[in-house]
Image (spheres, grey):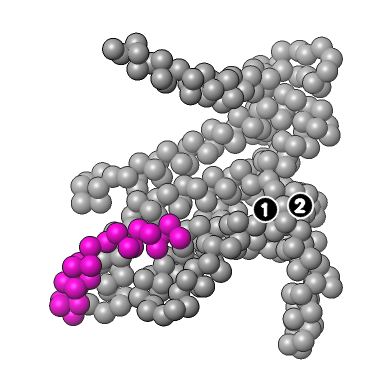
Amino acid sequence: MRSRGWLFVLPALAFYATFVLWPLVTSVRYSMLDWNGIGESSWVGLENYRRILTDPAQLAPIVNSLKLIAFFTIVPVVVGLASAALIHDWRSRFVGAFRTTLFLPQVIPLVASGIVWGWIYSSTGVLNQSLEWMRLDSWTRPWLGDFDLALPAVGVVGAWVLTGFCTLLLTSGISKIDPQLYDAAKVDGAGRIREFFAVTLPGVRREIGVCVIVTMIGALASFDIVFITTRGGPGRETLVPGVQIYWLAFLERRIGAASAMAVMLMVLIWMLVLPTQKYFQRDPTTKP
């Protein structure tokens, strides 16, 4: 009987092994080589990893991706929580339109979003034109070409894209909270803010965990938005691991170094996601 059950699992397992496990093993093997993808390869062991960890230029993309977590994760979760709470309490026919407007960036391809935001941030774009109209000419600048503001500008695009996802998921989580809990809070004299922290926030703990994990992975594995808007520039200010892997593998033809960066990115994601998942899944009433 058990062997018959494995027959149903086998196709999915074979598909997973072919397209996930085998490429993963291959990437680890390539990361131990000095290879241009065509000619002969030579074994270098952990040298590619040592270069990444000791070379500031190689380590900078990982640091940039960690900085993007503030925009890709913290901003969408906070704004999503506020928007979800507002949608839950707001009794109006415009709620549906508000929810759709927030979620709209999710259905727009990231490449298209990157192109549009590139126009907005350009020297003659909507943002600078708006600042000029408000007599704030000193604030205008080529936002994606500014060494200090390029990374935050890209982060704003990521926050814009992911806020709708967080809002929709958290709205669904709030709708599952027992209404009697809100009634009890009101009987106890709790205001809107106290009600939010005492009832809403604990009630959507798991949904917040999903939002944090998905957006965190989006920040660490970002490629589309960065590649379309800045290609990692100016200089290396917005370079992230995804773009770095692309440059190493397809332009510099350093397959081993690109594979090592990919493996390190995977390990970094595991190191951040697994503890986060464990934290949000445990019962908050139990001691850690």
| Pointer 2 local density, CA inside 10 Å: few below 14, some 14–19, many at least 20 | some
Indicate the position of residue 161 as horizontal and vertical percent values: 60, 59
In front here: 151 or 22? 22
Provide the residue designation for mark 2: 228
> What range of the chain is rendered magenta?
168-189
Q: Residue 67: x percent and y percent?
A: 59, 53
Q: Write the residue at 52% across / 18% down.
A: 14
Q: Residue 132 shows which numbered tag? A: none
Q: Quadrant of residue 153?
A: bottom right
**Whole-Å distance between the Cαs marked 2 and 1?**
9 Å
- Considering the image in quadrants, where does the N terminus appear? top left
The percent coordinates of residue 86 (x first, y second) are 40, 74
Question: Looking at the image, do the residues carrying marks 2 and 1 touch, with CB atoms under 8 Å apart?
Answer: yes
Of badges 2 and 1, the one in the foreground is 1
Inspect the magenta stretch and tell me whether residue 185 lies in it. Answer: yes
In the image, residue 115 above or below residue 36? below
